[in-house]
Image (cartoon, rainbow, N blue to C red):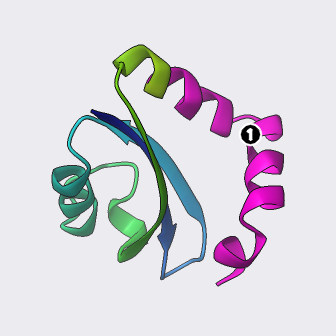
Amino acid sequence: MYYVYFLKSIKDGKLYIGSTPDLKKRFRQHQQGQSKATKSRRPFKLIYYEAYSHKDDAKAREKFYKTGWGKNHMNKHLPKTLLS
């Protein structure tokens, strides 16, 4: 399986969107500061994820969520989750 995931920084409240074949391992890497992109924004909460059977589908979905349309989609479907 391949996963698209949303992390929310407890430190600054901002979101990080990524994809990975091993969600548990990748989340642990983010928490331990092993990702340059998120190292300074630790700790994180995993607030949402989707599972895909094909890597290309997960990558396409990650790319979509990083657009304005994707962000609007998430704001409509998870308003309370994104605010908490």
Relative side of 63 to 38, left or right: right
Residue at coordinates 74% horizontally, 39% vertically from top-left?
70
Would you say residue 35 sits in the magenta stretch?
no
Residues 11 and 25: in front is: 25
On the question of residue 6 being in view, the answer is no
Residue at coordinates 77% horizontally, 70% vertically from top-left?
79
On the question of residue 20 being in view, the answer is yes
The x and y percentages for residue 2 are: 32, 33
Q: Is residue 80 positioned above or below 54 on the image?
A: below
> Which residues, given as a range, are shown in magenta?
59-84
The kind of residue on which mark 1 rests is Gly
Say which residue label 1 marks: 70
Magenta segment main secondary structure: helix
Q: Is residue 65 positioned above or below 49 on the image?
A: above
Q: Is residue 13 positioned above or below 65 on the image?
A: below
Would you say residue 73 sits in the magenta stretch?
yes
Q: Is residue 11 positioned above or below 44 on the image?
A: below
What is the residue that sits farthest to the front in this orientation?
53
State the SS at label 1: helix
Residues 60 and 51: in front is: 51
The x and y percentages for residue 63 are: 59, 28
Residue at coordinates 19% horizontally, 54% vertically from top-left?
34
